[in-house]
Amino acid sequence: MWKNIIIHPKKCTGCHLCELYCSFHHFKINNPSRSRIHVVRSEPYIDSPVLCIQCGLCINSCPVGAIIRNKKNGAINVLIDKCIGCAQCVFVCPYGAATIDPVTKKALICDLCDGEPECVKNCPEKVLEYVDSTKAVYYKNLIISKLLKKESVPLEPYPK
Amino acid sequence: MSEKIFGYAGQILRIDLSKKKILKESLRKDFIKKYIGCTGYAAAILWYELKPKIDPLSPENKIIFSTGPLTGTLCPCSGSYEICFKSPLTNAFGESRSGGIFGPKMKYAGFDHIIIEGKSDKPVYIWINNGEVEIKDAQHLYGKTVHETTEIILEEIKEPEASIACIGPAGEKLVRFAAVMNDRDRAAGRCGGGAIMGSKNLKAIAINGEKDIEIANPEKFYEFVTEAEKALLKKTALRRFGTINAITVLNAMGALPTKYGYTGFFERAEDVSSERLLSKYLIKRRACFACPIGCGRYSEVKHGIWATPPHEGPEFETADMLGPWIYLSNLEAIIKANYLCNNYGLDTISAGNVIAFAIECYEKGWIKEDLVKGIKLEWNNPETMIELIKLIAKRERIGDLLAEGVMRAAEKIGYGAPELALHTKGLEMPAHDPRGETKIMAIKYAVEYRGGCHVHSGFPGLYDRSPESLNDYGLKQFGLPWPPKGKFIEEGKGIAYRFFAIFGQIPEIMGMCQFASMGSEGNMITAKDYANIYSSLTGIEMNEYDLMKIGERVYNLKRCFNVREGFNRKDDKLPKRMYEPIATGPVKGEYVKNLDLMLNEFYEAMGWDIETGIPTFKKLKELGLEDVAEELKKI
């Protein structure tokens, strides 16, 4: 079964380590602006990573067919040689998860690190979880129901 | 840039505000080899470029924003930058560290150091975007608080990801302990960097960047940094309770500075403890860039007269200096005071120190009544504290006197005030009492190049805090006396402190947080780990002994800077109160008995002249600082 990453935003301290691990894994450099995950700090209250949910809207938006779904792990893969950096995927992405690499000028979309996401593995606060798609569904339903009740996701200010 | 240097950005930005000239220089390879970076590199720049005995608030002074090779990399706790300058408080070498994301952004923008020179004729701010530099008008920002300034600049430059370091009204008014604030609530607080920025009419620096920091040996580097991250995750108490946990810990030891150092035991400490903060006011934890510890607090007071918007803090130093230090236990007022200090751009340690000092002077009848009309100068009065913070930041009435710092204020007040003032070299003492905590802090306060300071370089307080202490900081292999003899035994402390002084320079020159460098092997980053991480990042091979040598060189250079300014053994002293017994609590009666003994030991261990406390020619030559020694000879 395919897996997906879910986020527990309230645990995030805004340390940006996920961005650093992401850019390191893909390019062997340190540069958060070349990361496929983005930590947003919005005053007041909010620190949270934002990342691709692998929905695939970008696949059809690509005019040159450079975005495909990896049959093995269900991840979105960008064929770098084909990508022309037109940013159609950036426009179509509802989450702001797709970006253009400031150095190579090609699309950056989360590829789940070939089934072993570095951000999940190294997050010190366990904000990210790599779970079966069914569990991700349950978690998303939970959030929707909380929002309907105008409740917030439980606050966990410190690690257990 | 001629040849690629891994790990570094490779460029220095030099901005002359008098002539509005912007210059980009290459990083000097010989300086990297000798001083690595950050405060080491900056100390060398200040040594060679500053004329001796200048007025710190004159255009001749420079302020350098510095990052180290590890800043902005995957290495945990590497989100630092430091500011270096000649301090308006001490007239000695001034440096101050801050976290947040400003330092990493400097590296991503392509600069290791930013040197600010001269003085602008009108208020300006600097906007650096990926190597492009612009000096912009800031007249409309003058008088604005730190939070307001940040919001306005972010709107103007239209770059929400940018990081901003700025001063508040206190810096503009040249309060001698004004802080440079970045990312809203992170402070490079000590030594008065904010006053230097104010004296140059520089309101803020905004910065953003998207450049790579390259790695020489990625596989090795990854291995070392993930190991370091695992080690730091073991700091569970610091993670969960933050630095403010020290209130309870130190109070149990009888070493929580209370009522301007009168005692080390505060009977109402429960009220300002981390548990109370956690249960009532903490929203969540917040971390600096690349930090797995996340000791930062993010809190608010929702209702009542002390209500504040959400902001970062309070940390331990703030909680004690604006709490027990003023004999106060109202945590809500402390949070409010922290918020105000952050927004006005004041160093909370120095602010707490001068406020308590004023109260005690008034109690003794040394401050004239007309100066304090309408203010009740008394212990345990939160309204007074808040009022004084506002007056200091605006330099009004008694605030104008206190804004000069405790040393200068004491001289103006006269009577017994100069003897009472708790400072060394002019820098106000922080919330660690050498009498009750450990005597190694006594020698530290006395000799430190930036004055009465608990972290630069290195916090040695964990070394012998308890008999079963295992905290050797990984220094046994270099000869640190082990096991420690006991915290109240003064003999040998001078020798032991030598190792902490030298090791403490390493995180500073690397661009790291000190919290990563305390403890013992397995829960900290030791000298050996630093050497491994540095070598794999930059490709410059180095072992832990080379690194300690560089640490020693930098420590000596900073000392030499002070010697050139006229400092020597006579300035390595402690305030009178440290020789008086602690009045109450578990370690009642403890005091510093023989500082001279510790000084002699320390000078001898460092290879300095025992009579004068000046590094000897031989020592400096051994460290490769012949030219520095030659210049010192001329004095």
Image (tube, rainbow, N blue to C red):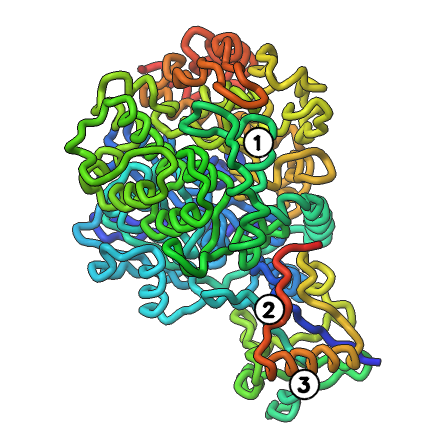
Q: CA distance from mark 1 to mark 3?
A: 53 Å
Mark 3: which amino acid? Cys
Chain letter of disc 3 in the image: A
**Residue nearest the observer in this picture, B223 or B253:** B253
Circle 3 is placed at which residue position? A55
Label 2, secondary structure: give it.
strand
Above or below, comparing residue B420 to residue B594 in the picture:
below
Q: Amino acid at mark 2?
A: Pro
Q: Which numbered disc, 1 or 3, marks the residue closer to the eye?
A: 1
Query: Which residue is labeled 2 in the image?
Result: A49
- Find residue B11 and report its horizontal and vertical position in percent: 44, 50
- Whether label 1 touches label 2, CB < 8 Å: no
Residue behind mark 1: B250
Q: Is residue B598 left or right of residue B411?
A: right
Question: Considering only vertical position in the picture, is B457 above or below B12?
Answer: above
Mark in the foreground, 2 or 3: 2
Mark 2 belongs to chain:
A
